[in-house]
Structure formats: C-alpha cells, structure tokens
Amino acid sequence: MFSILFGNMALAQKYSSKTGKVTFEASVPLFEDVFAQDNNNTVILNSDTGEIASVSAVKNFHFKVKLMEEHFNESYAETAKYPKTTFKGKIQGFDKTKLSANPQKYTIQGTLNFHGVDKAVSSIATISMKDGKIYMEGGFVARPADFRVTIPKMVMKKVAENVNVEYNYTLVKQ
C-alpha cells in the first residue's frame, strides 16, 4: 500500500506508526452513542516534504455495542466490498527542524478514500517533537452522504449528518 503512495520515498527521512488511534463519532443527543475507535491505524510521514499517508482496515473500528459494529460493517461501510480506508496528503508549511516539545498548529490537506469514494479533506493538526518522536493529533468532519453511505430512514435521526473524526499518532523514525 505505502509503496504505491510513496514510491519515491526510498531516500527520504520517514517516521511511522502502526498503532495510530483514529476515532469517529456520529452521535445525536437523546440517542445511543455512535462512536468507534481503531487503535491500529498505520501512518507514514516523509519528514523532508511533509507528505503523509495512512491506512486503516475498516473492520478495526470497534464500537461499544456489537450489534452497531455489525450493522456498520455490513450495511454502512460494506467492509467486504471496501475493506480499507486511506488518506494521502501533505502537511502545509511543514519543517521538521522547527518542531519542538511545544505543540504547533499545521493544516493538513489531502484525499480521504472511504467506501470507494475519494474526497478532499482539510484538517488542523497539533504537531510536536520530543525524545526523537513526532506527536500529531487533530481532526476533521466528514459527511456520510459525501462517501455514498446510505443511512436507513428508520435510524436516520439517530446518526449525525456530520461525523467528527479524530486522530492521534506517535511517529518514530524509520
């Protein structure tokens, strides 16, 4: 996967993680929480250029309620047909030499692929560096309709139109 995304990174300085945390929440007040988490998101950063990519197996998103997780995988995300979600983008104005333990805000722009649909995404991330590791956290909003995810009418009012996606990475030098 990453060889496709970063074919020209052989000589680049890379940082990565296979234990990135990504969550999404689509809860609506007065209804059951719609919240899932993946603790195995893989991410790679080219610290020379600010290019970043990540991939998650969609089945790695776990819910508190197993039935909700089953419906998500079978009906909404259709994980048998679309097993992965990917992001490929660039951290705007990224300069590794300016990173410190004091977190700085950056904008990340790129393309999120979910449910077979590519969509431009912009995210504000807080990035810092301590003990040789790069720490990154941020979030963005995604709309299921933008990714051709159909919410059945009987549960439509129980799922938010805007899904809050958050990520938290600790990247180590490769």
Image (spheres, rainbow, N blue to C red):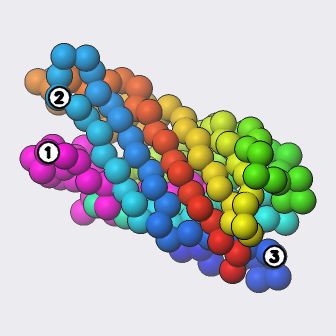
122 left or right, relative to 79:
right
Label tally: 3
> What is the x, y in percent for residue 55?
49, 63
Residue at the image point whose x is 28% and y is 60% from the top: 59
Q: Measure the alpha-carbon separation of dots 2 and 3.
A: 45 Å
Question: Which label sits in the foreground, 3 or 1?
Answer: 1
- In the figure, 135 relative to 147: above or below? below
In this orientation, which residue lies closer to the viewer: 125 or 70?
Answer: 125
- Per the image, the residue denoted by label 2 is 32
Residue 133, quarter of picture: bottom right
- Residue annotated with mark 1: 65
**Contact (Cβ within 8 Å) of mark 2 with mark 1:** yes
Percent x, y for residue 49? 83, 61
Boundaries of the magenta span: 60-88
Lateral position of residue 76 relative to residue 86, left or right: left
Q: Say above or below: 124 vs 77.
A: above
Callout 2: 10 Å neighbours few (<14), some, many (20+)?
few
Q: CA distance from mark 2 to mark 1?
A: 9 Å
Quadrant where the image shows the C terminus: bottom right
Residue at the image point whose x is 30% and y is 46% from the top: 36
Rendered position, 116 above or below 32: below
Q: Residues within 10 Å of mark 3 (few under 14, many from 20)?
A: some
Q: Residue at x 50, y 32 (%)?
A: 141
Question: In the picture provided, is 7 more to the left or to the right than 23?
Answer: right
* SS for callout 2: loop
Q: Which mark is residue 12?
A: 3
Res. 57 visible in picture = yes
Q: Where does the N terminus fall, quadrant-wise? A: bottom right
| Element type where label 3 sits in the image | loop
